[in-house]
Image: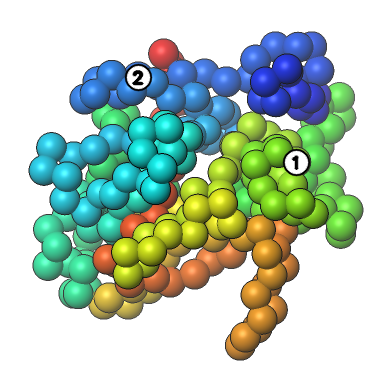
Amino acid sequence: MGLTTNQQGFPHDECGLDPYGGLKDSRDGQVYRTVRIGKQNWMAENLAYMPADGHGAWAQEGGTDSTEKYGLHYSWTTAMKLDDVWAHRAWPGSDSLHQGICPDGWHLPNYAEWEELALFVERVADLSQKTLTPLPDSVNTGSLLKARNAWGEGYKGLDSHGFRALPSGHRYDSTYAVGSSAYFWTSHTSNDTLSIERQLLSYALEGFYYRNAEELYWYSEPRTTGNSVRCVMNAAQDSL
């Protein structure tokens, strides 16, 4: 059963039912949409929890309204809830089920969990046959995860599974790219000073290689960069 949209533009299934669950963060009372995609339960909004000391967390440009829409940007060490010393050292810990800054019962997704998400949304579920069939070549992973009516003209998202990725940008050298891209931290590291993120764009880049604006990319960033956080549930459990 595919998703259509309600009057607010949020995905609903073909029977008109809201596919979203809810998560209430006990730390600040913030409530987030959640969505089940394949065998995973994801936050369908970016995390907006501000640590008590505010360290390594930055509000989006535009004040409260932007924060409510896009969430916060976090350094990798803050997202992982690690001391800043690990911004420049090889971290020896496990990237599996690492809670970090996520609410209780949720964790920062690792490389494999993002891959599982991408693999699932790259296929169209045929519920009557209970099989997965590949998408046409013209439809790419990024467009399936992007929220509808939130990206640039010509790069609108399909939001086929309710992930609702918004162009929340990232923080690099005190500048932001809100409105044209989205960057999400993973718990995975690539070397002593870089960690892995997932990236969505509303434009194509040319340089060492060409990126299709509709794809979902792996990329390594300095751990002091501010990226968005999407948490994934530890195991099947009741939401709000």
Residue 231 lies in what quarter of the image?
Answer: top left
Q: Answer yes or no: is residue 160 visible.
A: yes
Horizontal and vertical percent position of residue 66: 43, 38
| Colouring scheme applied when the structure was drawn | rainbow
* Residue 31 in the image: above or below residue 162: above
Q: Quadrant of the C terminus?
A: top left
Spatial CA distance of label 1 from label 2 is: 27 Å
- Element at label 1: loop
28 sits to left or right of 231: left
Q: Amino acid at mark 2?
A: Lys
Of 63 and 218, the residue lying toward us: 63
In the rendered structure, which amino acid carries the disc numbered 1? Answer: Leu
Residue in the image at 59% along x and 57% along y: 180
Whole-percent x, y for residue 197 in the image: 45, 61
In the image: residue 238, left or right of residue 30: right
Q: Which residue is at the front of the view, 83 or 128? A: 83
Tell me residue 203's x, y (percent): 68, 64
Q: Secondary structure at mark 2?
A: strand
Quarter of the figure with residue 189: bottom left
Q: Who's the residue at 18% across and 74% down the image?
A: 89
Task: Please give left or right for residue 217 compared with residue 186 in the image.
Answer: right
Quarter of the picture containing the N terminus is top right
Residue drawn at x 42%, y 59% as measured from the top left? 176
How busy is the neighbourhood of tag 2: few (under 14 within 10 Å), some, or many (20 plus)? some
The residue indicated by pointer 2 is: 24
Residue 158 is tagged as: 1
